[in-house]
């Protein structure tokens, strides 16, 4: 290997300058000889230059090889930390959010179907708030009528003494009402403000069944789909 390197060095620094330099620059042979002597002096110093370059570059290459795995390790740690944060946030949401609702059905000459789902967030161990929807289908064979009621609600509740619930909600429903002036039915939005409380029975770590007695503070017989301002609701939360 050292012989090949010496041959290449002589070819580049001795032979090529001697052959090419006079033709290109058109100088005399005395200048060429002087140039060859300068190259000989330079070749004596090449060994020292090679040693110095080796001593300088070797630690730099070693440092670069050591730095790359360290950077990759830091990147892996950052990715792992982001993954842990995402998992922690998802676990937090799963622990706080809940679902549930009420419902009922009866069939015969009068068909009645009520589906009222809800979802909420446990803001504190005792306080929760959320939204819900309502759909009611009613059909009477006696009067040959059928209608649908739909809408939504916002609610909040407070749990106290482990088993008791204070509950309030604002509800807005769309239903058909009879207009005596027009002698026909027309749809209207009717608001309600049921407030009250109830009791619950646990079902496992998160779920429970509940019974609520509510009173609608905005109740009007002419604009409500309910026959009374009082409501008795049975529901489940999980």
Image (spheres, rainbow, N blue to C red):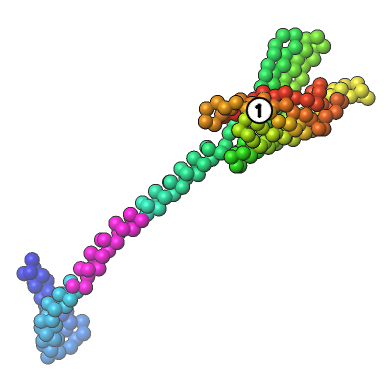
Please state the horizontal and vertical placement of residue 95, each as a whole percent of the image. 53, 38
Displayed quadrant of residue 172: top right
Task: Tell me where the magenta segment starts and ends, as one range.
Answer: 55-74
Does 37 sit left or right of 153 as displayed?
left
Percent x, y of residue 39: 13, 83
As helix, strand or loop, the secondary structure at mark 1 comes to: strand
Q: Is residue 4 left or right of residue 151?
A: left
The crowd level at tag 1 (other Cα within 10 Å; few <14, some 14-19, many 20+) is some
Image spot of residue 225 (x, y percent):
80, 24
Residue 27 sits above or below residue 202 on the image: below
* Residue 88 in sight: yes
Q: What residue is at 8 percent from the left and 66 percent from the top?
A: 1
Please tell me which residue lies in front, 233 or 21: 233
Q: Residue at x 80, y 9 (%)?
A: 142
Q: Main secondary structure of the magenta part?
A: helix
Q: Is residue 197 left or right of residue 3?
A: right
- Up-down relation of residue 219 to residue 5 (above or below): above
Q: Is residue 70 magenta?
A: yes
- State yes or no: residue 14 in magenta: no
How many marks the image carries: the answer is 1
How far from the left and from the top, in percent, is residue 72?
33, 55
Residue closest to the eye, 117 or 166: 166
The quarter of the picture where residue 5 lies is bottom left
In-image side of 195 versus 122 (left or right): right
Residue 100 visible to an observer of this rendering: no
Query: Which residue does the numbered mark 1 point to in the structure image?
Result: 199
Please identify the quadrant where the C terminus is shown.
top right
Residue plotted at (87% across, 25% down)? 222
């Amino acid at each position: 290997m050292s012989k090949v390197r010496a041959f290449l060095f002589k070819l580049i620094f001795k032979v090529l300058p001697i052959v090419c330099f006079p033709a290109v620059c058109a100088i005399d042979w005395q200048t060429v000889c002087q140039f060859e002597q300068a190259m000989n002096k330079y070749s004596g110093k090449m060994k020292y230059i090679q040693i110095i370059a080796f001593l300088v570059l070797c630690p730099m290459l070693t440092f670069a090889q050591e730095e790359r795995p360290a950077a990759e390790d830091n990147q892996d740690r950052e990715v792992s930390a982001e993954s842990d944060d995402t998992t922690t946030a998802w676990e937090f949401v799963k622990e706080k959010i809940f679902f549930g609702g009420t419902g009922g059905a009866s069939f015969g000459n009068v068909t009645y179907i009520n589906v009222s789902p809800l979802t909420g967030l446990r803001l504190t161990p005792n306080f929760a708030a959320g939204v819900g929807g309502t759909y009611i289908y009613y059909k009477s064979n006696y009067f040959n009528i059928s209608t649908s009621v739909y809408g939504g609600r916002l609610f909040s509740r407070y749990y106290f003494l482990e088993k008791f619930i204070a509950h309030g909600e604002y509800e807005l429903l769309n239903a058909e009402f009879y207009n005596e002036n027009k002698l026909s039915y027309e749809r209207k939005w009717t608001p309600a403000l049921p407030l009250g409380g109830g009791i619950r029975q646990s079902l496992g770590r998160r779920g429970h069944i509940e019974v609520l007695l509510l009173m609608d503070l905005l109740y009007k017989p002419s604009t409500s789909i309910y026959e009374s301002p009082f409501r008795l609701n049975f529901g489940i939360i999980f």
